[in-house]
Image (cartoon, rainbow, N blue to C red):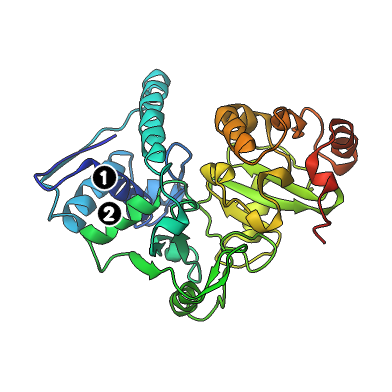
Amino acid sequence: VVDVYGRGMHVDFEPVLERRVHHYINYAQGVWHIGQRDLTWVRISREAFTKGFRLRHLGEILCAMLKDEFARIIDRVQVTLYTREDDVLRLRQEARACYAARDARLENLSDESVDTFYACTLCQTFAPSHVCVVLPERVGLCGAVSWLDARAAYEINPHGCNRPVPRSGLIDPVKGEWAACNAFIREHSHGAVERVCFYSIMDAPHTSCGCFEAIVGVLPECNGFIVVNREYNGMTPSGMTFSTLAGTIGGGIQTPGFMGIARSYLTSRKFIRAEGGLARVVWMPKSLKEQMRPALLRAASAAALPEEFIDMVADEDVGVTVEAILPFLEEKGHPALSLEPLL
């Protein structure tokens, strides 16, 4: 838990500082941090431990770096490390309430209501060609940087990793492609990425770094897509686990048919809109389905999908192979099966 005090500090700046935790911890040699919010992984190498690295150094790094980079708004920093499970679970609930409040602020915003998107290049330390572009209806892949957060970060530091991207030169309104966005991504990916369609997963999809909360992957045999979250350790109908998929699509490359996303993007009106949106989701882990059920039900209703749509989506209890889940989808009359072929 990081407590900060400063006369220039504002609640809108909290997510900006929070996202820097990922950046700062990776400064330490032999220490690896990935993910965001309550889905982080931290690894400390044996070599780092042998050389004297201890848990308290995580706090010392955060205190020093936050005060250095945000001296204009922060006067004091305190970091508390909790190791008792009861404390961690209690604080996680408090944190999740904060995350929900942040996400709710975006509900009245749309991509069409703004003239500027924002880029985040924080993850270029892992993926040099990855440029994350944050839209009002498309949160950053880590799930921690919304359009409002990126705008606040730019206000704090105009020379930092968050920069404005003009929403101009519309090329394709269905796929979500803009000439100005392509030009920005081309420049800041060092020429590695020529174009991106923000609402498509099959044509020039958004690149992925490694901090994404979930992965969407094509499943041609079922004419749809699977969704697998970071916490799920089992096999998926694609024949790969989350870790294998992440290693395949991460690093800032474009992989048509596969894409890292924030979980909240699943309920966005712009979620893979070019391919049919939420109606294309045919499989996801049961834990994710239950955790997101209220939001998924609202999104399904907004998309005019059947009231029982969420229960039409297969999970690991149904099976983790195409042969196991396809009969289930056919029995339920899943809408993806009646859409035009993906391939």
Q: Secondary structure at mark 2?
A: helix
Give whichever of 64, 343 is nearer the camera: 343
Classed neighbour count for the residue bearing mark 1: other residues with Cα under 10 Å, few (<14), some (14–19), many (≥20)? some
Classed neighbour count for the residue bearing mark 2: other residues with Cα under 10 Å, few (<14), some (14–19), many (≥20)? some
Q: Position of residue 290 (x, y in %)?
A: 62, 26
Q: Residue at x 36, y 55 (%)?
A: 23
Say above or below: 139 vs 305: below
Residue topped by disc 1: 12
Q: Residue at x 23, y 59 (%)?
A: 155
Q: Residue at x 77, y 34 (%)?
A: 314
Residue topped by disc 2: 152
Say above or below: 190 vs 101: below
Question: Relative to 2, is 199 on the left or the right?
Answer: right
Question: Quick check: can you spot residue 215?
Answer: yes
Q: Position of residue 99 (x, y in %)?
A: 39, 36
Question: Relative to 227, is 198 on the left or the right?
Answer: left
Q: Are marks 2 and 1 in contact (CB under 8 Å)?
A: yes
- The picture quadrant where one finds residue 287 is top right
**What is the quadrant of the C terminus in the image?**
bottom right
**What is the quadrant of the N terminus in the image?**
top left
Amino acid identity at mark 2? Ala
Q: Position of residue 82 (x, y in %)?
A: 33, 28
| Residue sitting farthest toward the top | 86
For the residues labelled 2 and 1, the Cα–Cα distance comes to 7 Å
Sequence order check, earlier mark of 2 and 1: 1
- The picture quadrant where one finds residue 284 is top right
Give whichever of 137, 218 is nearer the camera: 137
Q: Position of residue 126 (x, y in %)?
A: 47, 62
Question: Quick check: can you spot residue 25?
Answer: no
Say above or below: 188 vs 297: below
